[in-house]
Image (cartoon, rainbow, N blue to C red):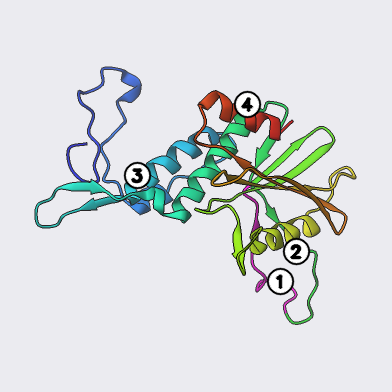
Amino acid sequence: MTKCGSIRPEAPSQDPRHSEIREIRLSRKAFDSVRVTSNNLFYRFLLSTCRLVFDSLLVDEATGKVRFRDFTRDEDKMAGLFQSFLFNFIARECAEWTVKSENIGWQAVSSTDPNLQLLPRMQTDISARRSGEYRIIDAKYYRRTLSSYFDIDKLHSGNLYQMGSYLMNAKTIGGIQADGMLIYPKVDRDLREKYEILGRNISVFTVDLNAPWQSIAQELRALMA
């Protein structure tokens, strides 16, 4: 990187397939212009990582020097990165599953809002399907896995309400209804909790991201077994 926001190769490529590649000025608009489809899903995690680094770039206007802020303290950005990681891991390492992010339509009617335009959009982090099974997976990232209510640890209520809305509105496919799964990075305790709420199965798990990569991969494969 020779200057803030631009990328320049160390040497011109001799490969004719690269003849159309041009230097660009990085910006949020440039990232927003990239469309990830089912044909290039493997780029999603890489793009998310690059954008995380770009958004964390700080430039001293007086000196022009560049430094990076500690994005690990930004829960929103880390949540996006964690979501992309889980999506791509399942897509690449759990071959029996097909994954996508999907919009779930509200099972609702309204005389005042017939097109349901005022209802919030429900878009899953990960919708995973395999023979006989359909899971809606939400990746959540917090500095503390559990919330605290009068010094008593509880699951984040908003996460459960959101998952409940997904499951109650998701259409069955071939008679198969969706199960829900909330996955958090492990912070202070392991979670392997399973509930049945209004006839729908919801699991809450943690993953130890500080473990060696082989252990992380093994843990995630076990969750998707």
Q: Position of residue 41 (x, y in %)?
A: 55, 36
Q: Secondary structure at mark 2?
A: loop
Q: Position of residue 197 (x, y in %)?
A: 83, 57
Real-space Cα distance between discs 1 and 2? 8 Å
Q: Position of residue 80 (x, y in %)?
A: 50, 49
| CB-based contact (under 8 Å), mark 4 and mark 2 | no
Real-space Cα distance between discs 3 and 4? 28 Å
Judge whether 104 appears above or below 113 on screen. Answer: above
Residue under label 4: 218
Q: Secondary structure at mark 3?
A: helix
For residue 53, the mark is 3
For residue 199, the mark is none
Residue at horizontal 49 percent and vertical 53 percent from the top: 143
| CB-based contact (under 8 Å), mark 1 and mark 2 | yes
Q: Which residues are magenta?
A: 113-125
- Horizontally, residue 130 falls left or right of residue 1, namely right
Residue under label 1: 116
Work out whether mark 4 precedes mark 2 in sequence or the reverse, and give the earlier one: 2
Real-space Cα distance between discs 3 and 1? 37 Å
Q: Amino acid at mark 2?
A: Trp
Work out whether mark 2 precedes mark 3 in sequence or the reverse, and give the earlier one: 3
| CB-based contact (under 8 Å), mark 3 and mark 1 | no
Residue under label 2: 106
Q: Amino acid at mark 4?
A: Gln
Check the picture and name the quadrant holding the C terminus: top right
- Name which quarter of the figure residue 122 lies in: bottom right
Real-space Cα distance between discs 4 and 2? 36 Å
